[in-house]
Image: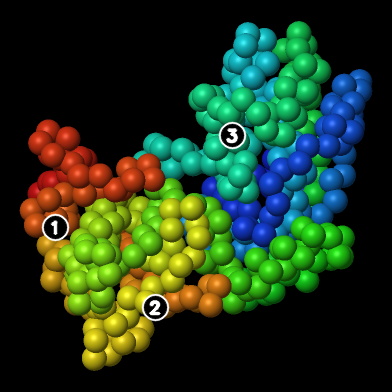
């Protein structure tokens, strides 16, 4: 474990991405805390603030090259600071200092990828995610929520401030609001620190322990599920299509239901960053597992080995590229007493088709490309080599 005091600017350094785990509770706004931070910013000159400890666990890098970290403790304080930064940014964008608005967004909210797309630096708890992302990106957002109330409270405080005042406040937040950042290694157990920084006996702590225990052996899986579907992560509830007739058994399931998995793997291979497919996880992040499908894919070998062999053989036969096995790995993971199939996919070295159809991961969807869009994408993704 490494520990050092760093300012907010360095906490959200370029290329760093934090994911709030599933045992973090939704954001709850504390007016007094927000008012205290704003008061420090309105001093002349603006004052700093020590924010206590922020605990994160280092994970395997994200497919887009970001350093990925599981945010064990500190989510609520960071979201309060982000609400204030959103207020500063929005007030600056309204006319006082548009350039400052862009600087705040790039410093605190978004990482720019090599392909020109951007990604959030912070993945907040699931119940707050839609509102948070809408506020960061400036799109339509829900009309209610504690994060919105915090942003509006701070916006009222900054309304009418000069460009100089806004810049001074933004600089103080970035450089003089500091954490003691505790960064755990991948093989360390994060729960003792989570428990240390949360009151024992509270319902949240008990719920957090239960949720944590379900993923304790696999923080990487915890972060992937908590982060939700994205450009680099996709969930599939099942491998096979369920029986088409009522009361149908295993023999009535359709093996071609696995086409969705083939399509997803091909889509990741055709994308510039690759990605991870989790089979046995619903769209909402609920882990249902795949063990009930074992007898459906191989009646003679009704276990993980039979399932992995089936999936591997089908992928090898359906992906139109040489040695496709070099571009993906199939792993068994465990969560909530269920098996989850994790397929990690590397970017392909050539276009990959399934039945002469071309798929690519776009946003949080795998889509088919046709006609001029297909030709244009392939020419840019795999430019022809010049002699």
Q: Position of residue 91 (x, y in %)?
A: 68, 16
Instruction: Check disc 1 and report the residue beneath it.
Output: 354
Between the C-alphas of marks 3 and 2, the distance is 35 Å
First in residue order: circle 1 vs circle 2: 2
The answer to which of 50 and 295 lies nearer the viewer is 295
Identify the residue shown where x is 65% and y is 66%.
211
Residue position marked by numbered label 3 in the rendering: 131
Q: Residues within 10 Å of mark 2 (few under 14, many from 20)?
A: some
Q: Which mark lies nearer to you, 3 or 2?
A: 2
Q: Residue 121 vs residue 65: left or right?
A: right
The residue lying at 44 percent from left, 43 percent from top is: 113
Q: Is residue 86 left or right of residue 81?
A: left
Q: Is residue 251 above or below residue 287?
A: below
Q: Disc 1 vs disc 3: which is toward the camera?
A: 3
Q: Residue 94 lies in what quarter of the image? A: top right
Task: Give the alpha-carbon distance from disc 1 to disc 3, as whole Å.
Answer: 37 Å
Residue 166 placement: quadrant: top right
Colouring used for the render: rainbow
Q: Is residue 245 shown above or below 292?
A: above
Q: Position of residue 243 (x, y in %)?
A: 24, 66
Q: Is residue 200 left or right of residue 213?
A: right
Going from N to C along the chain, the mark reached first, 1 or 3, is: 3
Q: Which residue is identified by label 2? A: 291
Within 10 Å of disc 1 (Cα), the crowding (few <14, some 14-19, many 20+) is some
């Amino acid at each position: 474990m490494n520990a050092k005091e760093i300012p907010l600017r360095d906490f959200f350094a370029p290329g760093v991405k934090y994911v709030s785990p599933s045992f973090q509770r939704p954001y709850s706004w504390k007016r007094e805390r927000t008012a205290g931070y704003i008061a420090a910013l309105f001093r002349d000159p603006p004052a700093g603030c020590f924010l206590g400890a922020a605990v994160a666990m280092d994970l395997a890098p994200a497919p887009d090259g970001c350093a990925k970290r599981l945010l064990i403790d500190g989510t609520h304080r960071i979201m309060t600071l982000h609400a204030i930064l959103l207020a500063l940014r929005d007030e600056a964008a309204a006319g006082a200092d548009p350039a400052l608005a862009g600087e705040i967004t790039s410093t605190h909210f978004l990482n720019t990828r090599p392909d020109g797309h951007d990604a959030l630096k912070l993945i907040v708890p699931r119940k707050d995610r839609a509102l948070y992302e809408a506020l960061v990106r400036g799109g339509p957002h829900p009309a209610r929520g504690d994060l919105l109330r915090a942003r509006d409270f701070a916006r009222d405080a900054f309304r009418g401030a000069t460009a100089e005042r806004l810049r001074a406040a933004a600089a103080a937040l970035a450089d003089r609001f500091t954490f003691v950042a505790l960064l755990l290694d991948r093989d360390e157990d994060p729960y003792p620190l989570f428990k240390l920084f949360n009151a024992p006996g509270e319902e949240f702590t008990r719920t957090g322990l239960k949720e944590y225990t379900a993923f304790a052996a696999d923080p990487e899986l915890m972060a992937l599920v908590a982060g939700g579907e994205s450009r680099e992560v996709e969930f599939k509830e099942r491998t096979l299509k369920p029986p088409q007739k009522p009361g149908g058994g295993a023999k009535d399931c359709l093996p071609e239901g696995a086409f969705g998995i083939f399509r997803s793997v091909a889509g990741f291979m055709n994308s510039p960053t690759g990605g991870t497919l989790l089979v046995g996880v619903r769209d909402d992040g609920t882990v249902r597992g795949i063990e009930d499908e074992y007898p459906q894919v191989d009646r003679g070998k009704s276990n993980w080995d039979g399932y992995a062999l089936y999936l591997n053989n089908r992928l090898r036969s359906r992906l139109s590229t040489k040695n496709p096995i070099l571009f993906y790995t199939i792993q068994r993971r465990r969560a909530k007493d269920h098996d989850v199939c994790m397929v990690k996919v590397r970017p392909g070295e050539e276009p990959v088709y399934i039945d002469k159809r071309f798929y690519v991961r776009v946003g949080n969807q795998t889509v088919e490309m046709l006609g001029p869009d297909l030709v244009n994408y392939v020419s840019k993704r795999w430019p022809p080599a010049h002699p």
